[in-house]
């Protein structure tokens, strides 16, 4: 089967080379991304560009995907209250995150295995975010290693990791993040075990991605992706594979075997001793947990439900945010991810108390459609939508956003 796939890939790449330059440019994605006008359109384009098994891995969520849907629909339940007679000739979108200046309040969320979507994977995301004056959070499960990404995409970076059972591995990862100049550790705490993702189960999604009849059938009508995939080195977890942790097992099994479900608050204290820089705890939805994390030395809280990919029926992040902001009371920075699909969503999250938002799937839709250019297009779209929303609402800077700009529909 793999030999057949290789032959098919070779044939497809020959066909691509034989195309006139305009058609080749179109297929490579750079022309396609320029015509995409919003995130919903980028998602639709990604669905057309990627095999179903890959699109579903990115787009899908846990269970009935109720939480994933609410992440978005709960934004729609909030109204923005515009003010008038305000000078909005210049709208300031810049802010600081953990003391670092960023040009916009939008950062890259950590996401693993993006090499499945495009061979540039996490490097493309990092470059696009750096290009926009922002920063990227690199996942320990990324397909490119810490060192590769640092070399190919120099710029401000945070490192996200889980708590592996093997604390020696965790310690080594922290050392490598330090060596690569990462500015903060993001500790994701909402994966004590793998969640049930029905789309992945139905599609037979596994690691490493095997070329099955189904992938091939999905890929055959997507020549650009198939050609890239077959010509690229095998996708693996670039950082942890080097330590021998990634075998040819399904992700679910990997997570259940490798991640430690017995983590307690003492482990946060252990991380606090291990890492001298800022620590953010990602995956907090309860204000008591947010307060406890800050009391144990966390510098930031990322209000996140993993994009609805872990506990289905957990609260939406925009719903959980206000109580957490109140509980933290300015003792740490609070961030939000999940469901950001419009610039106005960023404005609402900031008005509700978030320092900045992390964005996940939209960046990967852009990656699938046009590599780094596609990711850059997504960042531009969200930034310009945010600027427009702020201008129309009469809000001159992200620093002036607070709860007075929001009203719950019907409230
Ligand atoms: C393909 C994919 C892979 C992800 N991998 C990770 C990961 O390795 N670590 C992590 O903390 N979160 C991971 N997440 C969750 C994101 O960091 C983020 O919480 C979520 O995508 C935000 O929701 P959004 O996609 O609606 O923006 C992943 C999400 C996706 C879509």
Image: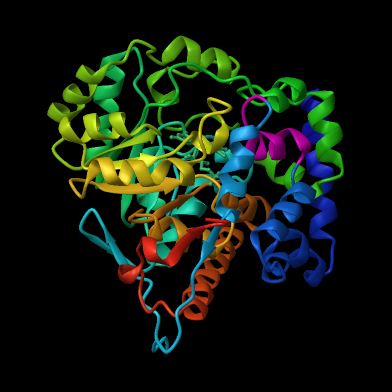
Q: Is residue 338 left or right of residue 331?
A: right
Is residue 54 part of the magenta span, yes or no?
Answer: yes
**Residue name at image x 20 percent, y 18 percent:** 266
Question: How many numbered badges does the structure rendering display?
Answer: 0
Q: Is residue 206 above or below residue 318?
A: above
Front residue of this view, candidates 189 and 230 = 189
Could you say which is closer to the camera, residue 333 or residue 235?
Answer: 333
Q: Is residue 116 visible?
A: no
Where 14 sits versus 253, above or below?
A: below
Q: Quadrant of residue 95?
A: bottom left
Q: Position of residue 164 (x, y in %)?
A: 36, 18
Residue nearest the viewer, comparing 227 with 87: 87
In the rendered image, which quarter is residue 165 located in?
Answer: top left
Q: What residue sits 61% from the left and 52% below the top?
A: 367
Say which residue appears at 35% left-offset and 75% top-offset: 397
Q: Main secondary structure of the magenta part?
A: helix
**What are the residue bounds of the magenta stretch?**
51-63
Which part of the image, by quadrant, shows the N terminus? Answer: top right
């Amino acid at each position: 089967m793999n030999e057949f796939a290789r032959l098919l890939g070779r044939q497809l790449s020959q066909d691509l080379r034989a195309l006139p330059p305009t058609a080749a440019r179109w297929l490579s994605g750079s022309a396609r991304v320029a015509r995409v006008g919003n995130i919903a359109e980028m998602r639709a384009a990604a669905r057309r560009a990627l095999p179903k098994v890959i699109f579903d891995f990115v787009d899908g969520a846990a269970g009935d995907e109720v939480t994933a849907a609410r992440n978005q629909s709960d934004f729609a339940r909030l109204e923005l209250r515009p003010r008038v007679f305000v000078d909005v000739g210049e709208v300031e979108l810049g802010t600081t995150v953990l003391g670092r200046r960023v040009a916009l309040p939008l950062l890259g969320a950590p996401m693993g295995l993006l090499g499945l979507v495009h061979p540039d994977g996490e490097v493309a995301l990092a470059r696009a975010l750096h290009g926009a004056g922002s920063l990227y959070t690199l996942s320990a499960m990324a397909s490119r290693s810490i060192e590769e990404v640092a070399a190919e995409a120099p710029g401000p970076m945070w490192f996200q990791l889980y708590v592996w059972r093997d604390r020696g591995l965790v310690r080594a990862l922290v050392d490598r993040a330090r060596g690569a100049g990462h500015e903060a550790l993001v500790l994701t705490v909402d994966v004590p075990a793998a969640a049930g993702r029905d789309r992945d189960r139905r599609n037979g999604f596994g690691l490493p991605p095997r070329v099955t009849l189904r992938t091939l059938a999905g890929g055959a009508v997507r020549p650009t992706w198939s050609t890239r995939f077959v010509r690229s080195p095998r996708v693996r977890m670039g950082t942890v594979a080097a330590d021998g942790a990634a075998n040819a097992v399904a992700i679910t099994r990997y997570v259940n075997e490798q991640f430690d479900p017995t983590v307690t608050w003492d482990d946060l204290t252990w991380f606090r001793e291990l890492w001298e820089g800022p620590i953010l705890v990602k995956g907090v939805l309860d204000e008591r947990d947010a307060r406890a994390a800050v009391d144990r030395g966390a510098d930031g809280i990322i209000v996140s439900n993993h994009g609805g990919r872990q506990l289905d029926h957990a609260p939406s992040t925009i719903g959980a945010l206000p109580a957490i902001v109140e509980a933290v009371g300015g003792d740490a920075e609070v961030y939000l991810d999940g469901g950001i699909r419009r610039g106005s969503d960023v404005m609402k999250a900031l008005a509700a108390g978030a320092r900045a938002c992390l964005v996940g799937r939209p960046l990967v839709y852009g990656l699938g459609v046009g590599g780094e250019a596609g990711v850059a297009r997504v960042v531009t779209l969200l930034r310009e939508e945010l600027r427009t929303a702020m201008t129309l609402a009469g809000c001159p800077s992200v620093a002036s956003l607070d709860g007075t700009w929001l009203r719950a529909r019907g409230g």
